[in-house]
């Protein structure tokens, strides 16, 4: 399901979400879900600097400790 782009922009701004956000229309959402193989949005992904999907079920940015642990594992710390 895709939300209204104006509502989406307003929510990102109002909630002050500190990460990168991409709006997907209905067709883009369907294609992305099929390619990455997960049920829907919002989803939290970790993509490496080469563009490879590393984690498709990353902790939410609000779960700082779990996110740090996950990133440190990927960085071999």
Image (cartoon, rainbow, N blue to C red):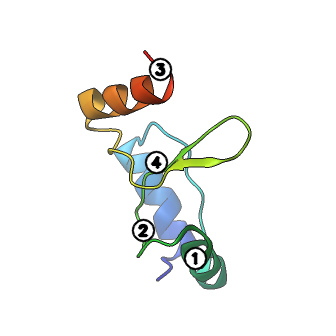
Report the Cα–Cα distance between label 1 and label 4.
21 Å
Task: Find disc 3 in the rendering and name its residue.
Answer: 76
Identity of the residue drawn at 51% across and 76% down: 4
Q: Are marks 1 and 2 in contact (CB under 8 Å)?
A: yes
Q: Are marks 2 and 3 in contact (CB under 8 Å)?
A: no
Mark 4 lies on a secondary structure that is helix
User: Considering only order in the chain, which callout, 2 or 1, is on the residue closer to the N terminus?
Assistant: 1
Task: Find disc 2 in the rendering and name its residue.
Answer: 41
Q: Which numbered mark, 4 or 3, is in the foreground of this view?
A: 3
What is the quadrant of residue 31 in the picture? bottom right
What is the quadrant of residue 69 in the picture? top left
Quadrant holding the C terminus: top left
Report the Cα–Cα distance between label 4 and label 3.
34 Å
Report the Cα–Cα distance between label 2 and label 3.
29 Å
Q: Residues within 10 Å of mark 1 (few under 14, many from 20)?
A: some
Which x, y percent locates residue 35? 62, 72
Residue 13's disc number: 4
User: Considering only order in the chain, which callout, 3 or 4, is on the residue closer to the N terminus?
Assistant: 4
Report the Cα–Cα distance between label 2 and label 4.
18 Å
Q: Residue furthest right?
A: 50
Q: Residues within 10 Å of mark 4 (few under 14, many from 20)?
A: few
Report the Cα–Cα distance between label 1 and label 2.
9 Å
Mark 3 lies on a secondary structure that is loop
Task: Find disc 1 in the rendering and name its residue.
Answer: 29
């Amino acid at each position: 399901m895709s939300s209204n782009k104006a509502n989406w922009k307003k929510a990102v701004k109002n909630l002050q979400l500190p990460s990168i956000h991409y709006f997907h229309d209905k067709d883009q959402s369907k294609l992305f879900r099929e390619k990455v193989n997960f049920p829907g949005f919002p989803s939290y992904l970790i993509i490496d600097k080469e563009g490879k999907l590393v984690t498709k079920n990353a902790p939410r940015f609000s779960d700082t400790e779990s996110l740090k642990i996950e990133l440190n594992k990927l960085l071999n710390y």
